[in-house]
Amino acid sequence: MAKRVADLLVDVLLGAGVQRIYGVPGDSLNGITDSIRTREKIQWIGTRHEEGAAFAAGAEAHLTGKLAVCAGSCGPGNLHLINGLYDCQRSRVPVLAIAAQVPSAEIGSGYFQETHPEQLFAQCSHYCELISQSEQMPRVLEIAIQTAISRRGVAVVVIPGDVALRDAVEQQPRLVFAAPKPTVCPSDDELSLLAEVLNRSKKMTILGGAGCAGAHSELVELAGKLQAPIVHAFRGKEFIEYDNPFDVGMTGLLGFSSGYHAMMNCDTLLMIGTDFPYRQFLPKHATVVQIDVRGEQLGRRSKVDYGFVGDTKTTLRALLLRLEQNQYDAHLKESVEHYRKARQGLDELASGDSGRTSVHPQYVASVINRLASDDAIFTFDVGTPVVWAARYLRMNGKRRLVGSLNHGSMANALPQAIGAQVSHPGRQVISMSGDGGLAMLMGELLTLRQHELPVKLVVFKNNSLAFVELEMKAGGFLDFATELRNPDFAKIAEAAGLLGLRAETLDQVEPAIAQALKHDGPALVEVLVSRQELSMPPTITYEEARNFGLFMLKAVLSGRGDEIIDLARVNLLR
């Protein structure tokens, strides 16, 4: 039989090292899924929602650094991909999306399920093109793959179902070379200037992000040379925190006071491989030096006095040869001691005092951290679970973290756990899910059972959109429309074929999580946690304090004084 365009498409993906495609089948995808059906080296991973497929592909790309693929059928099918693809694009992970289209002769007629993916996906991709002729395959697909890999983001190929079924003109892929791995370093003159700036500074702080991946030893050596504490952004946590005597934690909304202190009390801030977005947590009077492999990032978040384009590992190796040993260590010692006290305070909040009547989410997160394997992969929902993950999951160089940290989407944890488990079948994968996030894409519980994926879900159940409530309180608003009437998630898990467990009291938490982690298959632990738990940021402004007082006054005057009593009981009487 003659090779079809769909067959050539699958050949190109196989040649690029793709092992699986996440998606939901549909008639416009039939040519592609039928070609996958006959292959042994590529899998179709069916999800219950295309958004879940895109999140799963993004998690695989994040963990492997390689191209991952998702697909959706025409119209609403591929449209469902868009939120997950936005997350992939903003997380800078290489993902290819195949967006099937209505029959080519019907495009522009308002046909059933017709949309225009080239326009819809333009804002969440680096490349988005329509294949309307057989002659365009494989070149358009290969350009899309190269774009996703080289620019670390999303590429979209739109293909009508009838075009996929046509005879292919080309018979094999055109590109056969391995993905390039270039190094980027500032010029000699720039390195000399960078070294001069750092050599004349005394109180230096380093802020590192995900761009520090693969450069742990160079970063630690740099901190020792500069006598500089290292603050990490959340996306840099898994690459920076471990085996690091200079680490002083995080700053930002999810961080704690020590990171903020080290940033605000330096005279030189060195930002490396980070796109930390919160300007209010960056110093206004320090000299700011920034290193990033993407030139467009320089000065994006803060005023920058000196900006340099280079990848972290190459740049730091060249820079270290030019640096003098900083003899001033008072700032470092003060920052490390501040971190020790802040860490002690956080750990005290997570203690399992059996005398407590409510389950604090900090304790649940600390139990997860203690019982998880040394090479566990953690995913976490946006909302309060992301706070507890940031503060209580400890990294060791082998553990991995996956979240929606730039796009900030709800419901990411479960589908990202699917992508993590499928691509890492021998690893323990733990999802820290909020009750709101889990409910939004709860259908993916069925995906766990269908593909026999032994993901462990811990659901922080507080029957509310708790982080939204906290934002309302900080803004001086009475919380409204945030209460959730949730089902028994453990029973739903059992009905879906998972092990379902429930912990209502403090003494039930650790045994339930331990049982789930030992279970040979997917498991869900539903933990009832305090709704009124406050996740305090590193610093509180006068306006935030005033607004919180305004909230309490409104609550009392509205007859909701019992909420204030509960708030005090949960956060003060402990």
Image (spheres, rainbow, N blue to C red):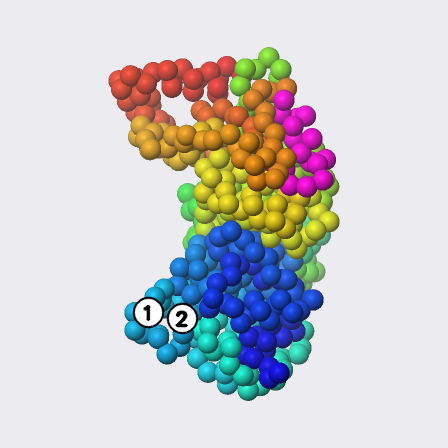
Secondary structure beneath disc 2? loop
Q: How far from the left and from the top, in percent, is residue 369?
A: 66, 35
**Label whose residue precedes the other's in the sequence (2 or 1):** 2
Number of callouts: 2
**Residue type at numbered disc 1:** Tyr
Q: Which residues are magenta?
A: 508-524
Q: Is residue 512 magenta?
A: yes
On screen, 536 above or below 397? above
Position of 363 with respect to 533 (left or right) is: right
Residue at coordinates 61% horizontally, 49% vertically from top-left?
450
On screen, 401 above or below 546? below
Asked whether the beta carbons under mark 2 and mark 1 sit within 8 Å of each other, the answer is: yes
Pointer 1: what residue?
Answer: 111
Q: Residues within 10 Å of mark 1 (few under 14, many from 20)?
A: few
On screen, 269 above or below 462? below
Q: How far from the left and from the top, in percent, is residue 397?
A: 70, 47
Residue at coordinates 27% horizontally, 19% vertically from top-left?
558
Q: How far from the left and from the top, in percent, is residue 555?
A: 31, 21
Pointer 2: what residue?
Answer: 102
Residue at coordinates 52% horizontally, 68% vertically from top-left?
30
Q: Disc number at residue 400? A: none
Magenta stretch prevailing secondary structure: helix
In this view, the residue in front, 261 or 551, is 551
Position of 243 with respect to 173 (left or right) is: right
